[in-house]
Amino acid sequence: MKQVISVLVENQYGVLNKITGLFSRRGFNIETLSVGETDDKSVSRITMIVDSGNSVMEQVEKQLNKMVQVIKVRRLDQGELVGKELALFKVGITSKTRGEIKDLVEIMGARIADISASTVTVEISAAPEQVDLMLDMLRPYGIKEMARTGMAALQKGSKAL
Amino acid sequence: MITGARAMVDGLLEQDVDILFGYPGATICPFYDELAIEEKKGTIKHILVRQEQNAGHMASGYARRTGKPGVCVVTSGPGATNLITGIATAYLDSIPLVAITGQVPTNQLGKDVFQEVDTTGMCAPFVKHSYLVKDAADIPRIMREAFYIASTGRPGPVLIDVPSDIQNTEFEYVDPGEVNIRGYKPSITGNDKQIRKIAREISGAERPLIIAGGGVILSGAEDLLAEFAKKNNIPVVTTMMGLGVLPTLDPLNLGMIGQFGNSPANYALNHTDTLIIVGARVADRAVMNPEGLMSHCKTIHIDIDSAEIGKNMEATVPIVGDVKIILKKLLREDIDIDADEWTREVQEKVAQSRLRPMKRRSNGTVGPKKLMLEVGKQLDDDAYVVADVGQNQIWAAKYINLNKGKFITSGGLGTMGYALPAGMGIKFADPDLQTIVVCGDGSFQMTMNELSTLAEHNLNLKILLVNNGRLGMVNELQRKNFSQGPYAVFLPHTPDFCKLADAYGIAHRMLDDESELEDAVREMLNYDGPFLLECRVGADESTMAQ
């Protein structure tokens, strides 16, 4: 089962290393990970998607909580979060496909971030499944390269970590 | 203005540290320069070990006697890599340490200069917390936090890595105030609702059993555990780390569980209907088949580390907190239980197991069980037994009867060579406490360079060296389970250990005849000063029932 773990940590060097080290040595697999400062510069938020059974997730949460530089940990169910991921796709174009790609971009609520004579770079910010769909739709046109950020997520409504 | 090095030393003085174990080198010299001032004043004593790993083990022994964090100090690079085994050993047994390492100057960090390694990085998996100091002004706060983190909650080692330029940097001292770390608030009191639930679960149990682990000792809850067991007439088994929670011959003590445990203890574990796990982490060596266990009993798991509950075995009732506080609360609850029949049954098994006769050994060797029983018979009531790792450890654990004393060993990591330096740490903490180190010829040779430190300080430490000319535990394992039999386990060119002791000026005796056993042990224990008793045991003696 895929779950999102949201972690508030001290914004200090070495913290990310300690967290990823914890995951690798205990055999927990991280699917995506995104890190950034919060409004409080001393605190960073790490958002991870982990695909594991419930008992493993409980261990992940407990082990994270044990770390001195971890301030708060929360497992979020898909239903209780707003989560978005940014992805960039560089796609080859010809005069024939340019219009089709433009249509796709519009339908998906994406945008063209960059363009050259032979490529466009498509930018999408959406839920991970939408990003997967965009990838599937663009693949036939020839993806030269792509990058995705991993999901950033917050709880829905007024609740905060 | 003070320097970083001064702040480090002041941080130690503030914690009433009066002894530390270490080995100097270039990057920690500013600290040592300040330490020298204190040594002259008589406030702090520095013990120079002969290899850095042993600074960690001595600090560990010191911590296990005093309950306070042991302090060790080494230099960067190889000093730190050598210390690693000491830190990891402490981590696996939840022993509070503060380890201070020198580091190359800040502007050279990451450039692979002389004696540089990523100390905080390489230690991350087995420290409770670590600091790489980048600003000297942080040192007073970090020193205070390090001792706090090491000694509260589930104890463990904390590492402080200090670049040499930071040690030399001057800054204006500001009192950092009380420790307040937002990400570290150990939960110790135990949820009252869970306490009542435990009382309900135990009530009506027909075959209750307590597993006491090292957490009981770390919490100082031995007496409370005994009181709880006696009040409800519940038998107790221990893990290796929990040995000494009850006297060996206490009627409720069934002995040690696990792969190498006593059979009555394992019988009880396999037949209980309500298992109360107290300060034990259900590790593989103690509980070999947690799933099987869960199928026939309810489990109540008391531990200060929530991550240990449910890690290896699901608990029917989990409770997180300090064993001492939880047992105190539990003693106030009404528990309606009548397990007398079960308790009598398992006590009978213990009585039977003690009647098994011992075979006399042929000339030239001593039976290990007989040896350990004799040692136990002659030890002081409160003596500490420090066992190494291997067959010697199992024999000592199973056959040296403890009364109010403790059994000290590297239970988690299984570090050979732990016993001698750890035993010395105990003696530095409490010179008058009778302490005996039990080791094999393999483990002894891993850290016997500390005989020099032992002689230097003339510690009244006893060393029982069980010599079978091989790595006995691996030998036994290979004989039982591997097609090629014993291989790469023979130690034919060991020195004459008595002559070696002599070379260090340490008294010694060779024991290879059972008829001299009583006298030899008496001579060792009565001798005023360090003493090595070398005992010849048969090559193929087993750790199993004998």
Image: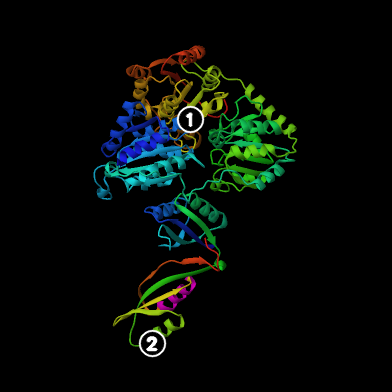
Residue closer to the observer: B372 or B201: B201
User: If the image is split into quadrants, where does the N terminus of chain A sit?
Assistant: bottom right
Magenta residues, as a range? Answer: A128-139
Percent coordinates x, y for residue B50 in the rendering: 33, 29
Chain under numbered label 1: B
Say if A112 sits above or below A84 in the image. Answer: below
Query: How far apart, in angstroms, are the residues tagged by discs 1 and 2?
Result: 78 Å
Q: Residue A13, image x and y in percent? A: 36, 54
Helix, strand or loop at label 2? It is helix
Do callouts 1 and 2 mark residues in contact (Cβ within 8 Å)? no
Q: Residue at x 61, y 48 (%)?
A: B314
Q: Mostly what secondary structure, the magenta segment?
A: helix
- In magenta stretch: residue A134: yes
Disc 1 residue type (three-letter): Thr
Whether residue B66 is visible here, answered yes or no, is: yes
Q: In which chain is the residue bearing label 2?
A: A
On the image, the x and y values in percent for residue B321 come to 58, 43
Residue to which mark 1 is pinned: B66
Image quadrant in which you'd find residue B453: top left
Q: Residues within 10 Å of mark 2 (few under 14, many from 20)?
A: few
Number of the label disc, if any, that sits on residue B510: none
User: Residue A156: within the magenta?
Assistant: no
Give B121 or B352, whichever is nearer the viewer: B121
> What residue is at 36 percent from the left and 85 percent from the top?
A98
Horizontal side of residue B35 vs B433, given as left or right: left
Tell me the element at label 1.
helix
Residue at the disc numbered 2? A99
Q: Nearer the viewer, mark 1 or mark 2?
A: 1
Query: Looking at the picture, which amino acid does disc 2 mark?
Result: Gly
